[in-house]
Image: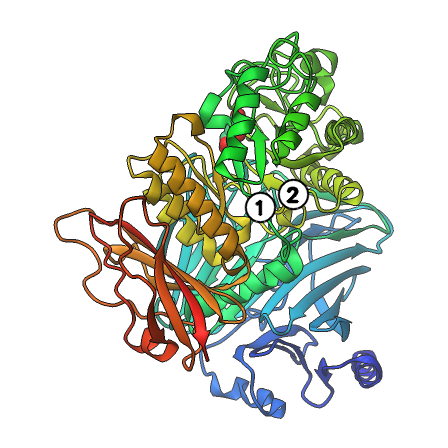
Amino acid sequence: MSSTLSNLKKCCIMAMVTFLIPCLSYSQKLVSVNTETNALVFTVNENNELNTLYFGDKLKNSSEYELIAKHYKQGTDYSEIYNSIYTPAGSKNLLEPAINITHTDGNTSLSLEYINAETNEVEPNVHLTKIVLQDKVYDLEVDLFFKAYYKEDVIETWTEIHNNEKGGIRLHKFASVNLYLYGDNDFWLTHYSGDWAQEMRPEETRLSHGIKVLDSKLGTRANLFQPSVFMVSIGKPATDNEGTVLMGGLEWSGNFRNEFEVDPLNNLRILSGINNYASDFELKKGEAFTTPKFWFSLSRTGKGDASRNIHNWARNYKVLDGKGTRLTLLNNWEATYFDFNEKKLKKLIEDADKLGVDLFLLDDGWFGNNYPRNADNAGLGDWEVNQKKLPNGIGTLVKTAEKNNVKFGIWIEPEMVNPDSDLYHEHPEWVIKQPMREEHYFRNQLVLDLSNPDVQDFIFNVVDGLFTENPNLAYIKWDCNSVIYNAHSDYLKDDEQSELYIKYVQGLYNVLERIREKYPKVPMMLCSGGGGRVDYGAMEYFTEFWPSDNTDPLERVFMQWEYSYFYPSSAIAAHVTDWGNQSIKFKTDVAMMGKMGFDIVVDELPKDELEFCQRAIKNYNELENVIWQGDLYKLKNPWKNELASLMYVGQDKKKAIVFNYLVNYRYEKGSHSPIKLKGLNPASIYEVEEINVFPGHEPIINKEHYSGDFLMKIGVNPKVSSGHPSVVLRLKEVSN
Ligand code: DGJ
């Protein structure tokens, strides 16, 4: 105990010297992580274990945190670590552990003692708290990190496990986070399910005692059935404007496991990390294992505030070039599928110019010669230009794009291989498959073994080669259509096979890191046969993601509604396509609330539709900054109303855009009363005008003036009806 106390003192002396916020109070034995409105406070118990005391609204007087515990009389915590900051397995834990290991000598017990904590300023607004725990018997150290983004009210947390024992140890479980929420058995979990074209379907359920697990065992495309993002409301289901809600997610593009355990004291334990399913990991003597980060944000004023905080955090710190601009584009996937040649593409490039977008994106089908990529069953892995379709290579297309004042982007799926390819025949050892078993395909393809550095080099060279040959290449769409079946690596040793799922993702990040070192800002879209992959680990390398191949705009209203709780609009790609029976106006209006693109045959558009799209793109260009960088307010929830309504308000409150869509087409459904707006300056006068009006139609609202006060207290009726199923309003401040 005395060595611990001296450590505590040491920490506090260091805190006085170098730290901006106090991390630990010697007398109270507290460690706290603070953001602008929240405090996450841990306390050292009599056995010198660190447990969660509190997570919520910051107290004005920090000395009062020590008074919290005595007001809880909930029953007996037999182990005294139900609320452990990082629950060790194999000693006295009675609940789900965060860490489970086998020591060098085969012993499986672990008990973690608090050693010290320190908080440093990493940069203005960002503080990093490091907490050191140590096993009482073995030379095993666990360091917990909490990175607090002060203004954004977001915390990232992760763990480093240091093996200082005499030999190797085996990690069986190694969570990134072990949160403890107090709440009288009144927790409401919102999680998501999905499949191809059905991504982000929300389900809200009241948690009951026991453990609810959300996980992925898919390897790649890890989010296909469920993403790792979730919300937990405490006390009652939160709405956009009220209620206490925690949002979180794991920054990891592979198998994950989220566990929600309501414990015998009626509190909620949340564990999230890499899925330990089939993933035992050997940690050699002297090595450390770093878990992926888990991000979370707590709001007591509903989902809207939480998501605005997350958007700010994402733009400021996470999404690649989050504060930067984005390119509108014309994609040829649905216009041609695999059936194109140079002439057809050149025409489409001219059409991109005619439409007024920034970039033409060439999708799947441009490569493979011995195994031409004319369908999804051949050619993947053979990244040379198909001579038949494109005899003059990609270069001539890039030049055509330049001539037509648009940029040029290209699709790749570099992690994958078709059995019908040169690559598969030349390097069967690069493919993930079980040597003794039949191959099993997902979209006729297999996954390359990214744990192998040669494969990593190959993938890096695919991308690097494209940029070297075409220095003006301006955009990459990075697809990933297969899950991992028959997980086995020819490269890893027999006793390392259980590390494949983890080493795959580490290999992927290694490649992306190298790409970003050389090409720091080229926009890249993260796609995974639709939305099978997005998370904030990947988004450090990508500027945007493809949420779903389902581009039916009515479906997208719901899907984008859900994605936009967790990701900023500049990152959510939304294209106008042939999916859905709605008008081109409805489709364009929906695409406009994300990062807009088109995937249509422009040449076949009737004159008025083309004119409409051209004008809408101009409107988008004028308002893109409001949409990408503004604050998102959700006004009418489509799951509960006849319409969806949401708005973006520019950071300076001078401009705003309001999107309204009918989602129920029954008789007389629509907006019968005004919708109250949010986020405006009450004293300012705003000019309200319907934009994206179809040629030949009159605007529903034409430059009417209202105060921000009126618009927020009374509102405005967008007059959405089956005759006008989508209405976009622009607000401009005219005086203040
Ligand atoms: C799946 C993607 O989601 C689509 O947008 C398209 O790029 C195809 N792959 C191409 O094979």
Look at label 1 and name its amino acid.
Answer: Glu
Ligand 1 contact, mark 2 (Cβ < 8 Å): no
Q: Is residue 90 visible?
A: no
Q: Mark 1 points at which residue?
A: 544
Q: Mark 2 points at which residue?
A: 523
Task: Give residue 300's position: percent from left, percent from top.
Answer: 45, 75
- Tell which tag, 2 or 1, sits nearer the viewer: 2
Relative image position of residue 709 (x, y in whole percent): 36, 80
Q: Nearer the viewer, residue 273 or 378?
A: 378
Q: What percent of the width, then of the height, locates residue 286?
A: 86, 51
Which quarter of the picture shows residue 381? top right
Q: Is residue 269 left or right of residue 418?
A: left
Q: Nearer the viewer, residue 709 or 481?
A: 709
Q: Can you give x and y, in whole percent of width and height, for residue 606 in the image?
A: 34, 30
On screen, residue 417 versus residue 338, left or right, reads right
Which residue is drawn at the image coordinates 47% and 66% (left, top)?
A: 655
Q: Is residue 445 left or right of residue 435?
A: left
Q: In this view, does 242 lie above or below 166?
A: below
Q: Badges 2 and 1: C-beta atoms under 8 Å apart?
A: yes
Amino acid residing under circle 2:
Pro
**Residue 177 vertical position relative to residue 526 in the rendered view, above or below:** below
For disc 1, the neighbor class at 10 Å (few under 14, some 14 to 19, many from 20) is many
**Quarter of the N terminus within the rendering:** bottom right
